Image: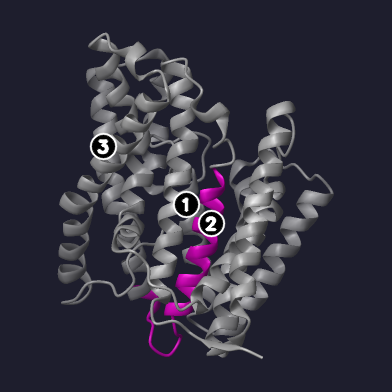
């Protein structure tokens, strides 16, 4: 029997997973943008399951929030203030930049960006069908989870269990009985994707209580193999049938469960994580927020320079993706990182957050 203790690089391993998740989302959106504007399908649409990076993010958020919080040491107000600082300021900057960009270069297909209701809803991440920043819908789920966690676990841990039992029961009832309310906020609150947060909390609950685990590598490699297998199945079926796996419950069992196993196993693996992957994990929120805009701008420059045909191929796509990644990382290093340090020093305490990103 082999017993492997918790690895000292546990947070670094999560940052590496976060980096891969953010890159997967970038390649998912990037493939769509390239196909739409340069009429080139990158790797035959291999990254059509790349949206699964969002499911990984949600499991990671559930884990990190549960693992780093304690009712004895955490104050509800301070917790929410830190979450607010982590999510909103940099998101507001990106939102404002996109609104300004639209005002200078309006288009009929993006006319919703001038709608005051959508703008206000976007700023506060209120559940709605359209946001100024396309990926902001996922942040709405993050905010909902933070609020539920703060109002339950930080008051009394058992309250979170009760909340999840009731919440999961409602989600399953709405799903299996196909209940429709035509109220968008309720549809959001009963979306199966929320189950991914509960998976992350469960992983943290077990991890907190077991400093050692037998054959932890089985969880890691099993989760990784299962994730790749589900990716392959989704790719094959979706390529032949656009209607396959269209409901959000599919992404939970296809990617949420494998991601949970992968994350749990990674926590115990005594592996050194390359610094570049840790950095990309730290920069993942910036990459997540700006990759679509950055890539779109790069393609506009390419088209206006009449170099479209030069980039409508594998090599050109790689150059565009690497450039998008590099510019997003610069945005993180120059803007997001410094803004977080300043806001936490001024508004929370004379120190930065111990655990970097919560996406």
Main SS of the magenta part reads helix
Q: Residues within 10 Å of mark 1 (few under 14, many from 20)?
A: many
Residue 96 - label? 3
Q: Is residue 120 above or below residue 11?
A: above
Asked which secondary structure carries label 2, the reply is helix
10 Å crowding of disc 2: few (<14), some (14-19), many (20+):
many
Q: Image quarter for residue 344?
A: bottom left
Q: Position of residue 241 (x, y in %)?
A: 74, 28
Q: Residue at x 42, y 90 (%)?
A: 72
Q: Residue 60, image x and y in percent?
A: 49, 64
Q: Going by the image, does 95 lie left or right of 223? A: left
Residue 322 visible here: yes
35 or 253: nearer the eye?
Answer: 35
Q: SS class of the residue under badge 3?
A: helix
- The structure residue drawn at horizontal position 49% and vertical position 27%, both measured from the top left corner, is 42
- Disc 1 designates what residue? 21
Q: Is residue 169 above or below residue 245?
A: below
> From what the image shows, is residue 41 above or below residue 290?
above
Neighbour tally class for label 3: few under 14, some 14-19, many 20 plus, Cα within 10 Å: some
First in sequence, mark 3 or 1: give its number: 1
Q: Quadrant of the C terminus?
A: bottom left
- Residue 104 lies, in percent from the top left, at 22, 19
Q: What quarter of the picture does the N terminus occupy?
A: bottom right
* Residues shaded magenta: 51-77
Residue positioned 18% across, 57% down in the render: 339
Q: CA distance from mark 3 to mark 2?
A: 28 Å
Q: Is residue 211 left or right of residue 271?
A: right
Mark 2 or 1, nearer chain start? 1
Q: Which residue is mark 2?
A: 56
Residue 91 screen position, x and y as percent:
31, 47
Q: Is residue 137 magenta?
A: no
């Amino acid at each position: 029997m082999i017993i492997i203790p918790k690895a000292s690089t546990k947070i670094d391993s999560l940052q590496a997973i976060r980096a891969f998740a953010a890159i997967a989302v970038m390649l998912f959106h990037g493939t769509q943008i390239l196909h739409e504007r340069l009429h080139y399908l990158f790797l035959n649409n291999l990254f059509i399951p790349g949206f699964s990076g969002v499911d990984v993010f949600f499991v990671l958020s559930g884990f990190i929030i549960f693992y780093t919080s304690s009712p004895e040491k955490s104050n509800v107000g301070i917790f929410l203030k830190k979450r607010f600082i982590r999510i909103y300021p940099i998101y507001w900057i990106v939102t404002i930049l996109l609104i300004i960009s639209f005002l200078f270069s309006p288009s009929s297909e993006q006319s919703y960006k001038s709608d005051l209701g959508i703008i206000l809803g976007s700023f506060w991440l209120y559940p709605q069908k359209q946001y100024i920043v396309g990926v902001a819908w996922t942040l709405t789920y993050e905010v909902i989870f933070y609020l539920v966690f703060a109002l339950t676990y930080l008051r009394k841990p058992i309250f979170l269990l009760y909340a999840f039992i009731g919440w999961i029961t409602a989600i399953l009832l709405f799903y299996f009985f196909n209940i429709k309310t035509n109220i968008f906020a309720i549809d959001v609150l009963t979306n199966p994707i929320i189950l991914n947060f509960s998976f992350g909390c469960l992983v943290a609950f077990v991890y907190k209580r077991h400093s050692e685990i037998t054959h932890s590598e089985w969880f890691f490699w099993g989760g990784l193999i299962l994730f790749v297998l589900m990716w392959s199945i989704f790719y094959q079926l979706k390529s032949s049938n656009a209607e396959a796996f269209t409901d959000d419950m599919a992404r939970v069992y296809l990617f949420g469960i494998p991601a949970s196993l992968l994350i749990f196993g990674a926590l115990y693996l005594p592996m050194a994580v390359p610094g570049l992957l840790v950095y990309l994990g730290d920069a993942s929120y910036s990459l997540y927020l700006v990759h679509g805009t950055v890539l779109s701008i790069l393609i506009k420059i390419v088209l206006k320079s009449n170099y479209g045909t030069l980039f409508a191929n594998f090599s050109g796509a790689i150059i565009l993706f690497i450039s998008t990644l590099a510019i997003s990382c610069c945005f993180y290093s120059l803007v997001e990182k410094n803004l977080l340090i300043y806001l936490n020093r001024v508004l929370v305490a004379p120190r930065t957050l111990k655990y970097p990103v919560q996406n």
